[in-house]
Amino acid sequence: MRIGGGARLALALALGADVAHGGERLCPGLRFEGELQPGLSETEHRLLCGDPRSEAWGSIPTHQARFHFRNFLQKRGYLHPSFIAEGTTEGVGTLVRIGTPTLLSRIRTQGAPEELRIERRRKLLGRPVTPTLLNEIEQWVYRRLQAAGHPCPDVETLADRDSGEVLVQMRPGPQAPLSAVIEEKPVPGTLPGIFRRYDAFQLGDRFNGDWLAVTANRINAQDVVLNVHFTPECSPAPDPEKGVTVRQSVTPGPPRLMSFGFGIDTEGLLLARAAWRHSRLGRGASWLDFTALGSAREQLLEATLEWFHLARPSRQSLRPSLLLRHRNERPFETLEARGGIAFSTSADGTRAGLVALAGPSIQGLRTYRGVGPRDSRFLSLDAEATLTSHAFEYYSADPRTGYRLGAAASLGSRALLSTVSAQRAELRGEVLLNYRDFDPPLLVLGFRGALAATFTAERPGAATGLPASFFHFLGGSSNLRGFGRQELPKDGLGGLTSAFLNSELRLGSTLPWNLDPFVFLDLGALGRAPLALDPPIYHSPGAGLRWLSPIGVFRTTLARGFPADVPGHWQLFISFAEEF
Amino acid sequence: MRILKGLLAALISAAMLLIVAGLVALRWPGILFTESTLSRLARIAERATGARLSWERAQVTVISHSWLDKSFRLAFSGLCIRRDADHACFRDALLGARIDFAKLRPRVLELGPIRLAGGDVGLVIPPSETRPHERGKPPLPPPGIRLPERWLIQPRLHPVHIELARARVSDGSSRYQGALSLDLADDAAGNPAGKLRLRARLDETLLSADGELALRAGPGARSRGAWLEHTLRARLESGGTRLIGQLQGGFGPSEVRQRLEVRWDERASGASRWIPRASATGCELRFLAHATRVTCPVRTPLPLPRSPWIRRLQPPSRAGATVTAELAPTGFPPDLSRPLKGHVAIAFEPLANALIEGTGGIRGEFHGTPARFPEDWRYEAELGVRLRVTRFEELVARLRQTRWAIPAPFHALEGSLELRADGRTDLMRGEIPLSLCTRLSSRTQKLDIDAGATLRLGALARWRDRSGSRQAGRVPGPHAPRPDAELSARAVLSQVRLELPRLQLEAPPPLLADPRIVPTRTFRERADQWKRTGEQSAPPSFAYDIEVATPSGRPLELLSNLAREPVPVRVRLRLSDSAPMEGELAVERVGLRVLRRKARLESFGLRLASPIDESPVDGLIRVTYADYTITIRVLGTAGAPTIRLLSDPPLPEEQLVAVLLFGKPIEELDPDQSESVGSARSAFADGALSLASLYVLASTPIQSIGYDPRSRELSVKLRLGAGTSLTLGSSGGELREIGIRKRLGPHWTITTDLSHRAQTPGAADPSEAPQRTASAFLEWHHRY
């Protein structure tokens, strides 16, 4: 025989029994059954049970308490609570069966453009359906739509509390080109439009929210101003032909910046750094930087001026610099003084940005330990270019896709104020591939490599006229992880050519606590002659663990260096803030 | 001569013959009035009127009472009159009358017997149009009725029985069909009396009616003129509605007096489900020369609601009102195509129980054309209806255990509230002016609200639109969708002081459910609705546009455990069903505790935007110390406010934070506290804390603060007591940090130095670039 709730209650009241047994009693007349995670806060408790210190909130009507409890449970994903009236010694009470959290079982989209694939968003299914989760989904979809060229998308979510299905309704709006950037107010003392030198986009290109973020972060990272951010103008709705206007909001802050810091490098050495920078010199917002850096291996004083010399906003600048550095590396100890000036420029396309600089420099070098003459000097023409994809830049805090390619050269001749003739050149590159473009990534395959050579008639050896810093070494967390830092070659003399290729496969967001395991294989070789590699080919297979901690990325690797004719050993690296 | 004589003799003979024939016809009229005579008369009438009269058999009987006093009796079998599509046929017809031809104008001495049985009548009425010549015609003077005295009042009446077994009338848009029987005869007192029974149905199903009309000439009618008394009992049914009425009254030469009793029974659920039955007993309708007057008491039993919570309010079991009306002269019967105007007043019977008092009435003028009702009708009324809850605490007590319990903190209030429908309005437009006045208070709280509102009943407007279109012969067009009801209101928070719940050191808990999480049925409905984007959505059943404001100089006051004194807040809000909430909230000067210090909030403004987290804020707080005053400026948005610190005399910013957080200069802080200074500054600058979290934190004894700029997550360690601490987290950001420089704010950064030297001359140094030594700095920055 089935007894209705009212009958049960009447029976309980008639018997005068307190049927409140089991479950957790919150207060007289209110208890719950089930495992509540996380538990109730004190404020929540007061909103359920009343606050004896308050006249107005001293007692909470039963139905208001139920209303509050339902909301508090919804916040935690418990979407099917049942409220049962029961008799207690205090009168009529409520038993709340909180049930179990409703887990996200399926995500469906409506109105999604072809380029948005919700299935690429991982780590959503199986999580409790909460307002926070819906916010997370909306934000992700919103960002992806903006990245796909829709400046003003409208995203709504709806969750079925019974099945755990979530429907994402999108009204992406038209794809539109970015037609103009409106500066809310100019930075005092500077030319209007100076921030356009940092743009990771071209006006007229299709709008991309990610590239706006890249631009803002370039400006913020340069400390030109305190803060800048961009907002597309969505009212009225952008015209697919005329494009969308973006509003630039700047918090300028004072232009002079002084900093002192302490840190640690990948070799586990303590560092100290002091810097002074004036980030908005003149109307072109040039910057002047003085830096002092000290560690057990290196002490450095450096002054750099980035002078935007043109009378209009421009990406072109002249960059004079002075450097005084003492280095105490394993193969050598040197004191170096260098001065130079370079012409610098940059350009950004739809997908990548190029930074290039070139100019003469003069360098005086005293070697205290290691190969090479005690004193040497070099007058060289230096050039460098780096091509970085915007995606690489956007995800630099959590690398997963994109590329960075670089080339550098330094030309010096004995006939022109140099102790010896030596030309240095380097090609380097890094490519990351995100398997199926998952977010967060499931598998990230990365390749990194470099080919560097010093062209000179000198050869490594005790009698060489080149200072040790002109020679190439391998080993360490950034090239051959099965060997110690600059361990190769074993004779400590270095080579005139070096090449390495790292490949790494990382499993992302699968293990708990933000731990990502990875395996890798590093290959490398050195040559005693320019552009000639000698056997053996060093290789070091290994595995590692990456931990995305609240303060940055920690990586640890364990690898063994080969080949057999070189005394192999296990090499352990623990690094901070270093990514593949 | 002979010819003349012959002619004269012929004339005399003819005259004699005519006289003899006339005398014979007068003496024996049956010789002249035969069936063939009727046939000839019928043909003459057909040529003159177009109506064809036919019968199967006819018998004419003429009885001669004297030379000039004759009785006629015509008996037909299968009598039919046809004209165009109209017809009237009777199985048997008997028409009798006694007529005195003594004077020039024949006088009907006796009428009847008349018997029309087995009648079948079909009439097609063309659409009614007001004929031009009738437009300027004044109405008949009251009482406007002229009974056919010569034919009905003065003659002696023999039994009249007319039976229409089948009657059909069509006017093009509607079709009526029914049956009718009429019996007339003199009563015992010799006055004409009759009874009409009618059973009719409109359009098969729409409306059915049956009724009985009893007519009687008043006493002395024959001597004093026409006075006709009648009793009409009628019963109409349409759908689930049943109307039973009785109209009693009389028609006289100077007055028509009517007494009406009506019972209305609404059995079907619908708009009138709250008033399923009503009755009007003792209604008086008087058609006078100068006016028509109506006095009608209406009573309705109020259904006892099933909901127990409404029963707790002990609602009245019945309601009553008296309707009095005075109409301008209309004549009788009223011409429905002419404008009508008058006064109508409704006085509600007072309503009172232990909880609610209700009194009032409606008085106003109306005008409109009955035939065009309700299209051009106006009812300019003066409303004066009042509903008052005298003891709010009683209402609270009765609702306490119900789902409609008055929630905290309002349930602690005592006093009264009053709802009025006050003011002048056109009720036919469905506009009702309302006002609400609360006078509620408790030991710590007060709630005095004066609100004025207009309630527009869209359903009434839709009905008028539809009726107007139909009467004008138009197909009702696609009108702009109107909600069933619209409320425009302005509420003045005359004096409000409310107590907020005691907040702890955490983000405030959600007080409302997230509307995005719904049950399966709603989920499917909303999903389908989203699919049909582009279609015009149905209007909401209830639309509102409400302004809420505090009067000048009297802000509302909020009592909070986080403030030393009531927080005065000026409010100007606009809430609407069709737009996000907009308006401003401004906190006026008030003493606060900010980071365990006595402080004064000089001003704080929040301009509401959508979403609410994007609402701009602007606040100014001063914390006064012995040697200096610190000014805290809160800018940005409610979702991500930024904090700026200033002081007089000027102090370095880190000193300000140190003093604010820990109450002592930075030189005296321990390392943990020093680090917290930077983290707090970063979090403030990043807008990592919501406004509510800031407010909560401002009142906490902070032990240390840690901040992760990448996740924009703030952890705060709070000192709860000796040796006890609590760590809280606040996450308001997202992982979009780019670059390897972790900016903690304008003064602190964690910098990962990978490319620091990569873009300087000489970067191709092989001992540098390939090695890519990574380093991380925790740096202190100072801008100036």
Image (spheres, coloured by chain):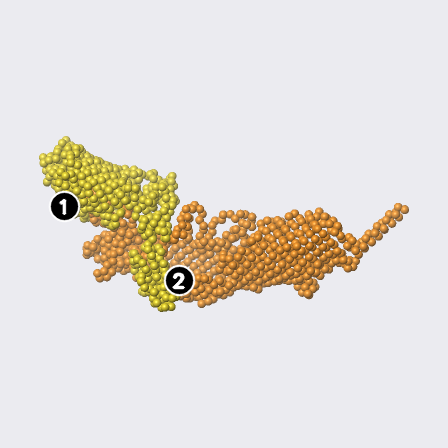
In this view, the residue in front, B14 or B432, is B14
Of the two numbered discs 1 and 2 in the rendering, the one whose residue sits closer to the viewer: 2
Picture quarter with the C terminus of chain A: top left
Q: Which mark, residue B264?
A: none
The spot of residue A397 in percent (x, y) is: 25, 45
Q: Dot 1 surroundings within 10 Å: few (below 14), some, or many (20 or more)? A: few
Q: Does label 1 or label 2 sit earlier along the sequence?
A: 2
Mark 1 lies on residue: A296
Q: Chain of mark 1?
A: A
Q: Is residue A232 shown left or right of residue A452?
A: right
What amino acid is at disc 2? Met
Mark 2 lies on residue: A1
Count the numbered circles shown.
2
Q: Dot 2 surroundings within 10 Å: few (below 14), some, or many (20 or more)? A: few
Instruction: Give the colour of chain A.
Output: yellow
Instruction: Give the colour of chain B.
Output: orange
Contact, mark 1 vs mark 2 (Cβ under 8 Å): no
Q: Residue at x 60, y 57 (%)?
A: B199
Q: Which SS class for mark 2?
A: loop
Asked where in the image residue A240 lies, by quadrant, the reply is top left
Q: Chain of mark 2?
A: A
